[in-house]
């Protein structure tokens, strides 16, 4: 079967996260600069190999001060570790959708993750490009990657949860 390469359509993709703040609300952020590639057997994504990277310096939570802190050594240490990387180890059909497993690397720490992938389908755009759409979701524990910054609250609890929810809308373009 023919190997097909797929590239990210950055104009129609986004990568976001949510984390509990003061354990009462979620703060949402994302990355403005990221890349993804996939390699499939034909147009079927079952067993696809997927790689992803995000530019840590592009993190955005709509608050410059918080973004600066996230880029600092307390969190991602963007100067020393400029990229977050993911490489799949398994992309398996799960009903109409997929389960994505792989290795996520942040701050030079690599740990396995398992994500849910809703398959949006395949379509040809107005310019003749063949595209595939996916919604990726899951949860990680940030301390697994050494993202341990936190502070105790006077009334008990902590400023930030360890659990981070991931949500991405990804559109891939079939390469010639």
Image (tube, rainbow, N blue to C red):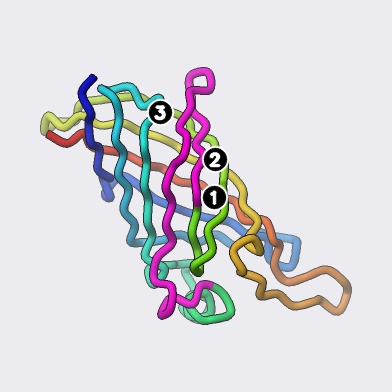
Instruction: Please say whether residue 106 is one of the residues in the magenta stretch.
Output: no
Q: Which mark is residue 1?
A: none
Disc 2 crowd rating (10 Å Cα; few below 14, some 14-19, many 20+) is some
Q: Measure the C-alpha gap from mark 3 to mark 2.
A: 14 Å
Q: Measure the C-alpha gap from mark 1 to mark 2.
A: 9 Å
Q: In this rendering, would 141 be left or right of 117?
A: right
Residue at figure coordinates x 24%, y 43% from the top left? 7
Q: Which mark is residue 115?
A: 2
Element type where label 2 sits in the image:
strand
User: Is the C-beta separation of discs 3 and 1 under 8 Å?
Assistant: no
Residue at figure coordinates x 73%, y 71% from the top left? 159
Q: In this rendering, would 46 be left or right of 41?
A: right
Q: Is residue 100 above or below residue 76?
A: above
Element type where label 1 sits in the image:
strand
- What's the magenta region? 76-103
User: Is the C-beta separation of discs 1 and 2 under 8 Å?
Assistant: yes
The image quadrant that residue 109 belongs to is: bottom right
Q: Which mark is residue 166?
A: 1
Q: Which badge, 3 or 1, is on the more N-terminal residue?
A: 3
x and y, in percent, of residue 15 in the image = 43, 52
Q: The C terminus is located in which quarter?
A: top left
Tell which residue pokes out farthest to the right in this image: 155
Q: Measure the C-alpha gap from mark 3 to mark 1.
A: 22 Å
Majority secondary structure of magenta residues: strand
Q: Is residue 23 above or below residue 131?
A: below
Q: In this rendering, would 113 be left or right of 48?
A: right
Q: Is residue 30 above or below residue 155?
A: above
Q: The N terminus is located in which quarter?
A: top left
Q: Report the residue marked by disc 3.
A: 47
x and y, in percent, of residue 122 in the image = 30, 24
């Amino acid at each position: 079967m023919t190997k097909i390469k797929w590239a990210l359509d950055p104009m129609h993709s986004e990568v976001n996260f949510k984390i509990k703040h003061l354990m009462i609300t979620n703060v949402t952020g994302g990355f403005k600069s990221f890349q993804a590639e996939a390699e499939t057997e034909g147009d079927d994504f079952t067993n696809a190999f997927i790689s992803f990277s995000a530019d840590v310096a592009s993190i955005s939570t709509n608050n410059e001060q918080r973004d600066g802190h996230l880029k600092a050594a307390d969190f991602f240490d963007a100067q020393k570790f400029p990229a977050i990387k993911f490489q799949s180890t398994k992309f398996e059909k799960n009903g109409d959708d997929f389960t994505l497993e792989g290795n996520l690397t942040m701050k030079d720490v690599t740990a396995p993750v398992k994500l849910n992938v809703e398959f949006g389908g395949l379509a040809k755009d107005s310019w003749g490009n063949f595209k595939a759409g996916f919604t990726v979701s899951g949860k990680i524990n940030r301390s697994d990657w050494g993202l341990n910054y936190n502070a105790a609250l006077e009334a008990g609890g902590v400023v930030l949860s360890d659990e981070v929810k991931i949500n991405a809308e990804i559109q891939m373009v079939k390469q010639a």
